Image: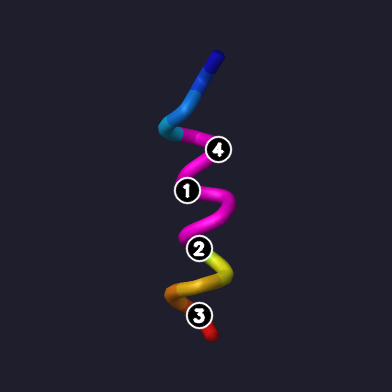
Amino acid sequence: LHIIPLLLLILKPNLIS
């Protein structure tokens, strides 16, 4: 599983919020 890309997808919205 690609954990880094998954984390980026989850963190990206968090950083923008």
Nearer-N-terminus badge (1/3): 1
Residue type, numbered disc 1 = Leu
**Badge 4 is on which residue?**
6
Q: Are marks 4 and 3 in contact (CB under 8 Å)?
A: no
Type of secondary structure dominating the magenta stretch: helix
**Quick check: marks 2 and 3 in contact, CB under 8 Å?**
yes
Q: Which amino acid type is marked by label 3?
A: Ile
Between the residue at mark 1 and the residue at mark 2, the CA separation in whole angstroms equals 6 Å
Mark 4 or 3: the one toward you: 4
Cα–Cα gap, marks 4 and 3: 16 Å
Most extreme residue toward the top is: 1
Q: Position of residue 15 (x, y in %)?
A: 43, 75
* Quadrant location, the C terminus: bottom right
Q: Position of residue 14 (x, y in %)?
A: 50, 73
Q: Is residue 12 above or below residue 17?
A: above
Determine which residue is flagged by label 2: 12
In terms of image quadrants, where is residue 10? bottom right
Locate residue 1 relative to residue 15 in the image: left or right: right
Provide the residue designation for mark 3: 16
Which residue appears at 50% of the width and 63% of the height?
A: 12
Q: Secondary structure at mark 2?
A: helix
Residue 1 picture location, percent across and down = 55, 14
- Determine the secondary structure under disc 4: helix
Residue shown at the point (57%, 69%) measured from the top left: 13
Q: For mark 1, what is the residue?
A: 8
The answer to whether marks 1 and 2 mark residues whose Cβ atoms lie closer than 8 Å is: yes
Query: Which residue type does callout 4 highlight?
Result: Leu
Magenta stretch bounds: 5-11
- Specify few, some or many for label 2: CA neighbours under 10 Å numbering under 14, 14-19, or 20 or more: few
Q: In the picture, residue 4 is in which quadrant?
A: top left
